[in-house]
Amino acid sequence: MSSAAGSRIVVTGATGNVGTSVVRLLSEDPEVGSVLGLARRVPGWSPPKTEWSAVDLASDRADLAKEFAGASAVVHLAWAFQPTHDPAATWRTNVLGAIRVFDAVAAAGVPALIHASSVGAYSPGPKDRSVDESWPTHGWPDAAYCREKAYLERTLDTFEREHPDVRVVRMRPAFLFKRESASEQRRIFGGRFLPGPLVRPQLLPFLPDIPGLRVQALHTDDAAEAYRLAVHADVRGAFNLAAEPPVDAELLGEMFGARPVRLPRTAARSAIAAAWGLHLLPASPHLFDAVLRLPLMDCTRARSELRWRPERTAPQVLEEFLLGMRQGEGADTGPLRGRKAS
C-alpha cells in the first residue's frame, strides 16, 4: 500500500497492547499516507490505510530491510514477556529480534527509529521524587524484562554512534493499560488461574501495603499519542511517559474503599516465588524485585518538546483496566483476544 501524499510508517509488534493503539492513531493521522503492521499473526482487524505482513522477529529468515524499504519511520514495539522460565527464548525475540530491526533500519535507509524502551530499563531509584531521562539505564539485572530493556539501551548507544543520520527516539513509558488489553495482561501476569470476573475491589478485605510498591501507570492510548508525535517531530533521545498521580497502597485504598495493611517484602516475595516456581503465576519474583526499585519518572521533556500530555489520570486508567478484566475484554488480534466473562 502506498500514498502519493503522506509518510509510510512501519510498526513492529503491531497487534499487541501498544501496537494496536499506535496503528489506530497513525491510520487516523492525515499526515500519514500508509501504515505497515508487522506481527507473527495477521489479525482480522483492518484499520484505514493499513496493511499487514506476517513476520517473526525471532527468525533470521525475515527480510526486514525489504519490509522497511521506503518507510519514513519504523516504530519498534515487538516484545515477548513469556516464557519467564526460559530467558533464552525471550532474549531471542526481544534482544536479537530488536538488533535485526535496528540493522534493517540502517540497511533500508529509514531516517527515523522510534524504539519502545521502558521504565524497566532504569537502574534502581527514588520513590519520593521523580528522575529525568539522564537517570542510569542499567535495569535490575535479575529480571529478564529489565535486563533486556537495559541491554537494548546500550545497543542503541552504539547504533547512534555508527548511524548518526538516523533519528533515534527511545520511549520510556510507565506500566501501560487499556480496556482492550485486559485479557492479555491477565494471561501474561496473572495466569490462567486468575479468573477475570473475580477481579473486583469489593472482594478485597484489605490491600497489601508493601514497602517500595509505588509505581506509575499510563493509558496505552496516551502512550501511543507520544509515539505518533515522535514520528513527526524533529526530536531525538529518550522521553519519560507517565500519568499522575503515582500509584501506591494509599491511592488504591481510596479508590477501592479498602484498608491498606503493611506486608513485609519478604512475605510477599516468598508467596510470588512459590507460585512462580510451581508454574501457577507467570510473573516472576525477579520482576517483583525490580518493581519495588523502579524510580518515579519526570515527564517534563515529553511535555515541552513533544507537546504531550496524558488525557487520563492513573486512577482512571486502573478503573478502566479492572473493568476490562472483569468483562473479559479484548480485541480482534492474536495477543489481545479476549474471553467473555461467565
Image: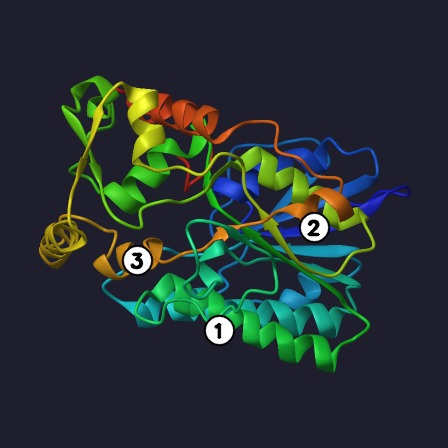
| Residue drawn at the location 54% of the way across and 67% of the way down | 98
Q: State if disc 1 and disc 3 touch (CB < 8 Å).
A: no
The image quarter containing residue 278 is bottom left
**Residue 294 or residue 320, whichever sits in front:** 294
Sequence-wise, the earlier of marks 3 and 2 is: 3
Using residue 8 as the reference point, say whether residue 10 is left or right of it.
Answer: left
Residue 212 locus on image (x, y percent): 31, 50
| Sequence-wise first label, 2 or 1 | 1
Circle 2 sits in a helix, a strand or a loop, which is it? helix
Residue in the foreground of this view, choosing between 132 and 192 = 132
Instruction: Report the Cα–Cα distance between label 2 and label 1.
Output: 23 Å
* Helix, strand or loop status at disc 1: helix
Residue type marked 1 = Tyr
The residue indicated by pointer 1 is 151
> Residue 184, relative to residue 253: is it above or below?
below
User: Residue 285 falls in which quadrant of the image?
Assistant: bottom left
> Is the Cβ of the residue at disc 2 closer than 8 Å to that at disc 1?
no
Locate residue 41, reporting x and y percent. 47, 47
Specify the label residue 287 is tagged with. 3
Q: Residue furthest front?
A: 128
At horizontal 60% and vertical 32% (from top left) the residue drawn is: 46
Mark 2 residue crowding within 10 angstroms, few (<14) / some (14–19) / many (20+): some
